[in-house]
Image (spheres, rainbow, N blue to C red):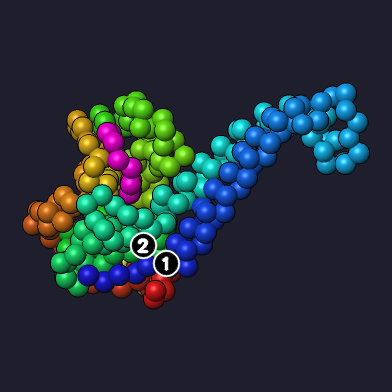
């Protein structure tokens, strides 16, 4: 399988996530300190230090403001870390990023396939004999219920205690709808650029919601897009390759065009 990965983007977003998380913890720590100010510096005590005096006069505002601000920074940091940072996964001793876990789940695909990682308008794209697959990755454990266009996670104490560490299910269908639109627009440019790219506009693009954590329990009822775990992906892609077969020349043309328009670097 050919691989096109935007390493610079991945590392930049991972660093951003860690910095935002540290800022969030720092803001929450400041709010905690502010809550002790009335004990350390009672209102009747005259404080000469300007910083201490500021905290003495505004401790309540600082304490209350720090809670939502710290939560926001920590949430954004968790968002980027969950998508870009390496970690240990259940049932596997190695450390890997989400895109590397997806890559391993497709091990065995030959050069007819190409995997684009954060290098196109769609974040995770697989080109194969049946067309294009666009993936929305989720890394959490727990339970997810999908009913048509509705996505939800049943409440549990585990979710409550890991609120800052979770990615959340969100709505992968809506997320992928925008990515598919941008990818289709990129393929449409082929016809205007070289006049022979009409076939690329007809290439099927299939959105797929992919859960990487093997401990995620899925309850699926007539979903609007395919929903599966990573260990089910290879079989699904191969089955689709038997149902829909594109000419080899078209697959090669799509791969070459996307690689020419992708941002990727060797690791």
Q: Residue furthest top?
A: 44
**Residue 5 image position (x, y, % from top left):** 37, 67
- From the viewer's perspective, is residue 149 above or below residue 85? above
Q: Residue furthest bottom?
A: 266
For the record, the magenta segment spans 136-144
Displayed quadrant of residue 218: top left
Q: CA distance from mark 2 to mark 1?
A: 6 Å
**Residue 13 image position (x, y, % from top left):** 49, 58
Give the overall secondary structure of the magenta segment.
strand
Do the CB atoms of the residues marked 2 and 1 lie less than 8 Å apart? Answer: yes
Based on the picture, tell me whether residue 152 belongs to the magenta stretch.
no
Secondary structure beneath dot 2 equals: strand
Closer to us: 115 or 240: 115
**Residue 179 image position (x, y, % from top left):** 38, 50
Closer to us: 89 or 10: 89
Q: Residue furthest left?
A: 242
Closer to us: 101 or 94: 94
Q: Quadrant of the N terminus?
A: bottom left
The tag on residue 6 is 1
Q: Residue at x 29, y 36 (%)?
A: 142
Q: Residues within 10 Å of mark 2 (few under 14, many from 20)?
A: many
Displayed quadrant of residue 99: bottom left
Q: Residue at x 47, y 68 (%)?
A: 8
Sequence-first disc among 2 and 1: 1
Taking the image as shown, residue 133 lies to the left or right of residue 179, namely left
**Residue 123 image position (x, y, % from top left):** 38, 56
- From the viewer's perspective, is residue 17 above or below residue 149? below
Residue 188 visible in this rendered orientation of the protein: no
Residue marked by disc 2: 117
């Amino acid at each position: 399988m050919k691989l096109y990965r935007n390493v610079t983007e991945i590392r930049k977003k991972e660093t951003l996530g860690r910095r935002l998380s540290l800022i969030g913890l720092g803001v929450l720590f400041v709010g905690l300190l502010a809550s002790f100010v009335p004990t350390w510096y009672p209102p009747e005590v005259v404080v000469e230090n300007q910083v201490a005096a500021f905290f003495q006069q505004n401790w309540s505002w600082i304490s209350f403001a720090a809670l939502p601000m710290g939560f926001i920074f920590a949430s954004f940091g968790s968002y980027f870390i969950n998508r870009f940072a390496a970690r240990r996964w259940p049932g596997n001793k190695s450390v890997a990023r989400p895109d590397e876990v997806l890559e391993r789940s497709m091990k065995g695909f030959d050069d007819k396939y190409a995997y684009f990682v954060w290098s196109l308008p769609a974040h995770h794209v697989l080109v194969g004999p049946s067309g294009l697959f666009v993936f929305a990755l989720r890394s959490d454990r727990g339970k997810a219920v999908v009913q048509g266009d509705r996505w939800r996670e049943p409440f549990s104490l585990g979710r409550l205690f890991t609120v800052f560490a979770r990615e959340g299910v969100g709505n992968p269908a809506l997320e992928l709808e925008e990515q598919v639109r941008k990818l289709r627009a990129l393929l449409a440019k082929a016809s205007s650029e070289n006049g022979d790219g009409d076939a690329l506009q007809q290439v099927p693009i299939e959105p797929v919601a992919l859960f990487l954590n093997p401990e995620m329990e899925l309850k699926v009822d007539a979903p609007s897009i395919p929903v599966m775990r990573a260990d089910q992906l290879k079989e699904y892609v191969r089955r689709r390759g038997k149902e829909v077969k594109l000419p080899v020349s078209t697959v090669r043309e799509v791969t070459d065009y996307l690689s020419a328009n992708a941002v990727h670097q060797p690791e």
